[in-house]
Image (cartoon, rainbow, N blue to C red):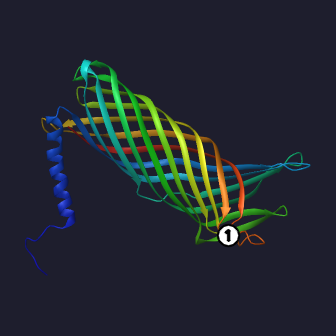
């Protein structure tokens, strides 16, 4: 085994490059009369997401209504990075632009629930006829671009606050797979157990949430030591969902529209490192609610369904009403370098 000084590996080069960037980028930003920050986030998200469909078959003498919902936990560890650049405008106004990238480090804790109901007008009330749970694996990425303008400010460089107007776009992407199934279904009004092996891949879901937003915020600082950011947003919700039910050889594509809202709080304690650099430590807490209340789901078979009689290959199913809903809480520790 050779010893001594050799060529540095990729990890060493990455560390050196990152160190040079931390030295050179703040100097360049400050020389241009700007300010900036780089923030590392680590924490967890928890909550629930729901994906549902409804359909009514008009028939004589009674119409038939069917509903199906998938409900899965948002319970993962997260790692994120935020980069911010800002500056001053005439009349004391300030502006800023930030980019956020975030991903999950773990699969969701908990299981996905699949529930089905039906009713017959005037004959059968809404009745659950199937319920199963499945383990899940998921990988997701959140990306956000946000701009803000401070039209109103109070105080001085030492103590003060700015009122912000926000405009931006958030994109959430998730690949989710369900494995196995444990539960029951009704067969001639008799509850029959459902037991699918835990290593059997039941379905794959690819979800996109397109979330343009506008909002208001507050940036406050006290003695340049205590920092507080507060943001309240109104979001447009555009959901694109692709459901490959691999056990049934059925593909569904859903589009939903709606509204959402979010509130975030970010208190931080700032410490001077040099005349140009400050280190801030704190937390970021966010709650986000999305409601895609109007939408359509298209369905078709790409091969025969082994659980149904006959051959369903290339069979188009009627379009159905589609909706989505989610409530997510995020709490992350923050390490921030400000310059």
Q: Residues within 10 Å of mark 1 (few under 14, many from 20)?
A: few
Outermost left residue: 4
Outermost right residue: 61
Location of residue 184 with respect to 103 vertically, above or below: below
Dot 1: what SS?
A: strand
Outermost bottom residue: 1
- In the displayed structure image, the side of residue 47 where residue 336 appears, left or right: left
Q: Residue at x 15, y 51 (%)?
A: 20
For residue 99, what is the image quadrant? top left
**Can you say which quadrant of the picture contains the N terminus?**
bottom left
Residues 327 and 311: in front is 311
Residues 187 and 23: in front is 23
Location of residue 44 with respect to 97 vertically, above or below: below
Residues 303 and 51: in front is 303
Q: How many marks?
A: 1
Q: Residue at x 59, y 59 (%)?
A: 243
Q: Residue at x 31, y 23 (%)?
A: 161
For residue 30, what is the image quadrant? top left
- In the displayed structure image, the side of residue 145 where residue 208 appears, left or right: right
**Can you say which quadrant of the picture contains the C terminus?**
top left
Location of residue 86 with respect to 66 vertically, above or below: above
Return the x and y of residue 26 as percentages of the image width and height: 17, 41
Return the x and y of residue 89 as percentages of the image width and height: 25, 24
Return the x and y of residue 283 as percentages of the image width and height: 35, 40
Return the x and y of residue 173 as percentages of the image width and height: 47, 52
Residue bearing mark 1? 195
- In the displayed structure image, the side of residue 39 where residue 211 appears, left or right: right
């Amino acid at each position: 085994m050779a010893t001594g000084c050799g060529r540095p590996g990729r990890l060493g080069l990455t560390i050196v490059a990152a160190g040079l960037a931390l030295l050179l980028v703040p100097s360049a930003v400050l020389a241009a009369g700007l300010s900036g920050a780089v923030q590392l986030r680590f924490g967890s998200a928890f909550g629930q997401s729901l994906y549902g469909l409804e359909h009514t078959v008009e028939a004589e003498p009674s119409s038939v209504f069917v509903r199906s919902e998938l409900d899965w936990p948002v319970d993962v560890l997260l790692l994120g990075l935020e980069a911010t650049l800002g500056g001053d405008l005439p009349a004391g106004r300030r502006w800023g632009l930030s980019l956020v990238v975030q991903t999950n480090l773990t699969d969701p804790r908990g299981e996905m629930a699949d529930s089905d109901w039906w009713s017959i007008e005037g004959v059968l009330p809404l009745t659950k006829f199937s319920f199963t749970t499945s383990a899940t694996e998921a990988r997701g990425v959140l990306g956000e671009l946000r701009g803000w303008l401070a039209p109103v400010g109070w105080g001085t460089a030492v103590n003060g606050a700015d009122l912000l107007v926000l405009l931006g776009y958030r994109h959430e992407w998730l690949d989710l797979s369900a494995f196995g199934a444990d539960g029951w279904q009704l067969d001639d009004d008799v509850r029959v157990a459902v037991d699918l092996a835990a290593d059997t891949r039941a379905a794959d879901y690819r979800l996109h949430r397109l979330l343009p937003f506008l909002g208001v915020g507050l940036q406050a600082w006290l003695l340049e030591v205590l920092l507080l950011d507060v943001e309240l947003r109104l979001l447009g919700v555009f959901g694109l969902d692709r459901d490959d039910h691999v056990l049934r050889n059925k593909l569904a594509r859903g589009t939903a529209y709606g509204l959402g809202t979010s509130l975030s709080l970010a208190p931080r304690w700032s410490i001077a490192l040099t005349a140009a650099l400050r280190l801030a430590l704190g937390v970021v807490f966010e709650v986000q609610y999305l409601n895609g209340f109007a939408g359509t789901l298209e369905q078709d078979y790409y091969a025969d369904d082994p659980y149904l009689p006959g051959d369903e290959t290339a069979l188009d199913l009627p379009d159905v009403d589609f909706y989505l809903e989610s409530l997510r809480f995020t709490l992350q520790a923050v390490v921030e370098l400000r310059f």
